[in-house]
Image: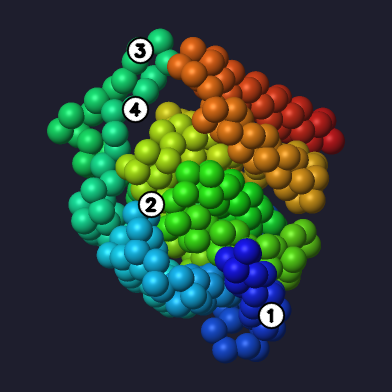
Amino acid sequence: MRLLAIAGLVFFLSRWLTRYLCRPNAPLSLLDHPNQRSLHHAPTPRTGGLAMLVSSACGVVLAALIHGGEKHSGSFFDATGIWIVSALAVLAAISFCDDRWGLPISLRLSVQVVLAGAVVSKLDLALHPVWIPLFGKLDLGWATWPMTVMFLVWMTNLYNFMDGMDGFAGGMTLIGFGFLAYFAWQGAHSLVFVFSLMIAAAAGGFLLDNFPPARIFLGDIGSIPLGFLAGTLMLLGQRDGLFDVWVPVMIFSPFILDATATLIRRALHGERIWEAHRRHYYQRLVLSGWGHRRTVLTEYILMVCCGIIGWFYWQSDVMERAIILLSWLAIFCVLGASVDVLAHHRIGQEAEK
């Protein structure tokens, strides 16, 4: 009950800080000017992530002080929590500098790889053998450690790639981390629960000004650390037996599958995958005439459905899990094909004009 009260305080603190940063002349407020990747048309403050990180950090610290006498498995006062917070702080600082002055991608990626490698090694977060329907468990062997680091770096960046529509990343953070908090509460994992709950509460306060039409954006200072945290909590949960890796992948699949499929698609077409674009499925929906509000509300419904699918998977036996997993993938294939049809129809209409 006390943690819920703290989460309420985090919500209001995030709300207040977000409103403050909405002012273009506020210290630490940076403007995002439209470019070829953008879906917005006017300069908009882009340091909303700072409000989320500061408010959620205050919540974690307050929770640690109140529960300071508790020493049990999964506690957020131990070295695990310190490593996570330290990595997030470094990523936030680097991302703010990038937002403010612009940093070489080689520097940013190097920092991410080093931090991911350190966290995976120090916290023993290497992926367990992954269960694949019809094939059984896949043991990556010697490739386990580098693949885990790559996964964490990819989660870090895909969250940033998907932060391109009003209310989208904020909604994924609220819903995704909200589901993680639920699973952690059910599994009595205090670290995942506290971190997820505070981030979800902070996202709620931020989302009030980020929902279309957005008055402020998350920015790299928010999306990069949030992606890293989501990936870290996924790995931490599977390390401690809270869930297998498919559960959090399902929860965040509206981000993971869109970003991954788009990356593969662009690579196959010989495009420069590191350059800005508007080829993500959510961007194509907006450009097809759906607009920000309709698209983001549809994505919210999809996010909730994916969380529920993850819950059913979590509760099921092996055979049922295979059916759920294959059905989940089939649903996304149908959704992706539907967006392709809609986008091509829109292109055809414009060509006729």
Residue, disc 2: 232
From this viewpoint, which residue is outermost toward the front? 69
Residue at the left extreme, as displayed: 142
At label 1, the amino acid type is Trp
Does residue 36 show up? no
Quadrant, the N terminus: bottom right
Q: Is residue 151 above or below residue 90?
A: above
State the mark number for residue 16: 1
Q: Secondary structure at mark 2?
A: helix
In the rendered image of this protein, does residue 347 appear above or below residue 57? above
* Viewer-closest of 205 and 74: 74
Secondary structure state at the residue bearing disc 4:
strand
- Residue found 56% across the figure and 39% down from its top: 251
How far apart are the alpha carbons under marks 4 and 2? Answer: 17 Å
Q: Residues within 10 Å of mark 2 (few under 14, many from 20)?
A: many
Dot 2 amino acid type: Thr
Q: Earlier in the sequence, mark 3 or mark 1?
A: 1
Residue shown at 23% from the left, 36% from the top: 144
Please say whether residue 212 is visible from this viewpoint: yes
The disc, 4 or 2, on the residue closer to the chain's N-terminal end is 4
Residue sitting at x 84%, y 36%: 353
* The label number, if any, that marks residue 103 in the structure image: none
Q: Position of residue 185 (x, y in %)?
A: 53, 49
- Residue ID for mark 4: 130
Left or right of 112, for residue 340: right
The CA span between labels 3 and 2 is 26 Å
Q: Name the residue that disc number 3 marks.
A: 135
Amino acid type, label 4? Val
Separation of disc 3 and disc 4 at Cα? 10 Å
